[in-house]
Image (tube, helix red, strand yellow):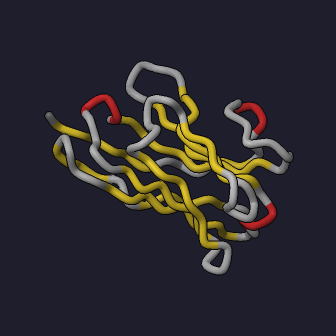
Amino acid sequence: QVQLVESGGGLVQAGDSLRLSCAGSGLTLSNYIMGWFRQAPGKERVFVAAISRGGVTTKHADSVKGRFTISRDNNQNQVYLQMNSLKPEDTAVYYCAAHSGNSLSISLAQYDYWGQGTQVTVSS
């Protein structure tokens, strides 16, 4: 069974840091471009960050650039999102996703596999 499982979410205060993890089960993540997306209450799911198969190339949304960093460890079959200087507007469910194409896509439609999400809540 193919699964992506996110972990590491929680309730933190503004200015704190969190590190999200995404583990692959039945899926070799090194074969995929990996992305993180988030969905705030009442809003659409949006792109946060993506990373190439080898981890050399990354892309981050302007809203998180300089605060969030995507990385991966293919030996551990995991992808990470380090989130620093968190703001209340970062509150959302965060999802990891796997994309079999060749570009660091920001489009949800191009991702083939999705995790169930992990809640991040940032209080002011």
Q: Residue at x 81, y 63 (%)?
A: 31
Q: Residue at x 72, y 55 (%)?
A: 52
Residue 10 visible in image: yes
What residue sits 42% from the left and 42% below the top? 66
Instruction: Find residue 14 and report its horizontal and vertical position in percent.
Output: 19, 41
Q: How many marks?
A: 0
Kindly give the residue lying farthest to the right in the view shown: 101
Q: Quadrant of residue 109?
A: top right
Residue extending furthest bottom? 75
Observer able to see residue 1 = no
Q: On the rendered image, what quadrant is the N terminus found in?
A: bottom right
* 121 versus 69 height, above or below: above
Please tell me whether residue 36 is drawn above or below residue 124 in the rendered image: below
- Of 50 and 38, which appears nearest the observer? 50
Is residue 40 shown above or below 75? above
Q: Nearer the viewer, residue 23 or 58?
A: 58
Relative placement, left or right, of 50 versus 124 is right
Residue 91 is left or right of residue 5, and the answer is left
**Residue 37: horizontal and vertical position, in percent?**
55, 39
> Quarter-wise, where is residue 17 in the image?
bottom left
Residue at 73% x, 37% y is: 105
The C terminus - image quarter: top left
Q: Is residue 64 left or right of residue 84?
A: right
Task: From the viewer's perspective, tell me whether residue 49 is left or right of residue 88.
Answer: right
Residue 118 in the image: x percent, y percent? 43, 50
